[in-house]
Amino acid sequence: MTTERTKRGIEAFPLSWPEGEPRAERQEHSKFDTGFVKCRNLLFDEIRRMGGAEAIVSTNIPLMRDGQPRANYTPHDTGVAVYFTRKKKSYVFACDKFVRVQDNMLAIAKTIEALRGIERWGASNMMERAFEGFLRLPEKAVETWRAALDFSPDQLINLDIVETRFKSLVRTYHESGHNPNRERYEQIVAARAQARKELGA
C-alpha cells in the first residue's frame, strides 16, 4: 500500500470526502477497542486481500514529514475515506459513523472483509456487483473553482498561485482555523482538486 501524501488528486490530509457521499448526522461510540496503527494495517490488509492497490487513506489527521499520520491526534471531523484501485477501476469507501478515526477505519476494513466473504462462499459474480456500488464517481466539475478560491474570472493563474491561495483559505476555514466552516472548507478542497486537474497537476 502506498504511503504517498497524494495521488490522483486525493489528499491523505486534509480529508478528501467523496463527492455526493452523505455525512453522518450523529456519531456514536463503537464497541471496537483497537489502536490506530492496528486498524490502519487491518484496512490495508483487507484491501490487498481482495486485489486492491494504490490505497490512500484520507483523514483530517495532519501528516508528519515521513507521510504518516500524527499519533494521538483527534480531529473534530473523524471521517475516513479510503481510495484504491481494483481491476483497473477506482473505488472509494467512506465512514464517519464513529467518534474515533480508527473505529471508522476498522468499520471500512470489516465491510471489505464481509464483501470478500461473498467470493469465498462461491458467488463471485455477486461480489463484483456489490463492489460496483463503491465505484468512485467521476468528480463533478467545479465550474466555479475560480470563484470558490476567490479568483476573478480573468485572473492569470498557475499551480503555485492555486496552492498558495488554497493554504491561505484552509487556515481560515479548517476546523482548527480562524473561522471554521465545514461546508466552505469542503468547497475549497473540491475546487483545488478541479483546479489542479485543469491546470495539469
Image (tube, rainbow, N blue to C red):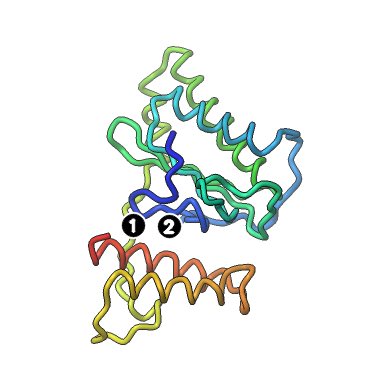
Label 1–label 2 contact, CB within 8 A: yes
- Is 75 located above or below residue 33 in the figure? below
Give the residue drawn at x 51%, y 46%. Answer: 66
Q: Is residue 81 left or right of residue 124?
A: right
Dot 2 falls on a residue whose secondary structure is loop
Give the residue drawn at x 74%, y 48%. Answer: 28
Q: Which residue is mark 1?
A: 139
Q: Is residue 70 left or right of residue 7?
A: right
Q: Which residue is mark 2?
A: 19
- Is 57 located above or below residue 42 in the figure? below
Instruction: Pick the residue in front: 92 or 74.
Output: 74
Residue 123 at x, y percent in the picture: 41, 17
Kind of residue sitting beneath label 2 = Glu
Q: Is residue 30 left or right of residue 53?
A: right
Residue 54 at x, y percent in the picture: 38, 37
The residue carrying pointer 2 sits among few (fewer than 14), some (14 to 19) or many (20 or more) residues within 10 Å by Cα, namely few
Q: What number is the disc on residue 198?
A: none
Q: Quadrant of the C terminus?
A: bottom left
Instruction: Pick the residue in front: 182 or 155.
Output: 155
Q: Quadrant of the N terminus?
A: top left
Kind of residue sitting beneath label 1 = Glu
